[in-house]
Image: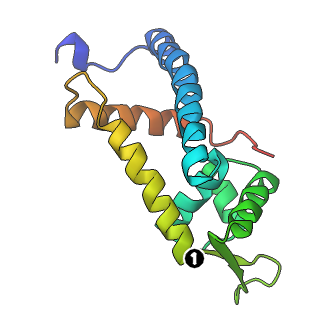
Amino acid sequence: MNDIDRPLAPDELGERITEVFDLIGPLYRRAFRKVEQGEQIEGASVGVRSVLDLLRRYEPMTVPQMGRIMALSRQFVQRMVNDAVAHGWAEVTPNPAHQRSSLIRLTDEGRSTITTVLAREHALNRQVGGDLTDAEITACVRVLKQLLATFDHVDVE
């Protein structure tokens, strides 16, 4: 096994992970601003965009389910759901399994909106340079999932 393939010692790992976090913050803020610029086009804020995308993948869902998946407070997610409902992009339906937690579903207009948002983002993401390989993206996703799992215990409320 060459040096690049060996697991890092804890001290080395800590330093390298700090490098990752030092890049994630600025990347997140810049991506957030880019999505906000799209709000002027589609009208969906970053939070509403996240709710619409989550519903696109897993609907129907309750607000608490969405909050857990996105690691956001239930109150914040509820505000984003309310905004989506006000725009006609989502609807609230009774939950046969739990009276106090309604199910949220996309409307046809919501599905169209998130499809448009994702198409615009996909076009932007296609511009990423660096001749990245599938293996590199897979490794990046693996690292980020491991980091996320490390902080699963952190309370978002």
Tell me which amino acid carries mark 1: Thr
In the picture as drawn, the residue positioned furthest to the left comes out as 1
Q: What residue is rendered at 70% in x and 90% in y?
A: 96
Q: At x 57% / y 61%, what residue is drawn?
A: 52
Which residue of the protein is positioned furthest toward the front in this rendering? 41
Say above or below: 47 vs 103: above
Task: Give the residue pinned by disc 1.
Answer: 107
**25 to 80, vertically: above or below:** above
Residue drawn at (65%, 60%), measured in percent from left and top?
A: 66
> Residue 131: x and y, percent?
19, 25
Quadrant housing residue 149: top right
In this picture, residue 34 sits left or right of residue 129: right
Q: Quadrant of residue 12?
A: top left
Q: Give the position of the N terminus as an image quadrant.
A: top left
Closer to the camera in the image, 19 or 2: 19
**Whole-percent x, y for residue 45 in the image:** 65, 48
Is 155 on the left-hand or right-hand side of 54?
A: right
Indicate whether 32 appears above or below 115. Answer: above
Left or right? Give the position of 79 relative to 93: right
Question: Helix, strand, or loop for circle 1?
Answer: loop
The part of the image, by quadrant, that contains residue 3 is top left
At which x and y percent is residue 111? 50, 69
Q: Residue at x 33, y 21 (%)?
A: 7
The coloring applied to the image is rainbow
Closer to us: 99 or 154 = 99
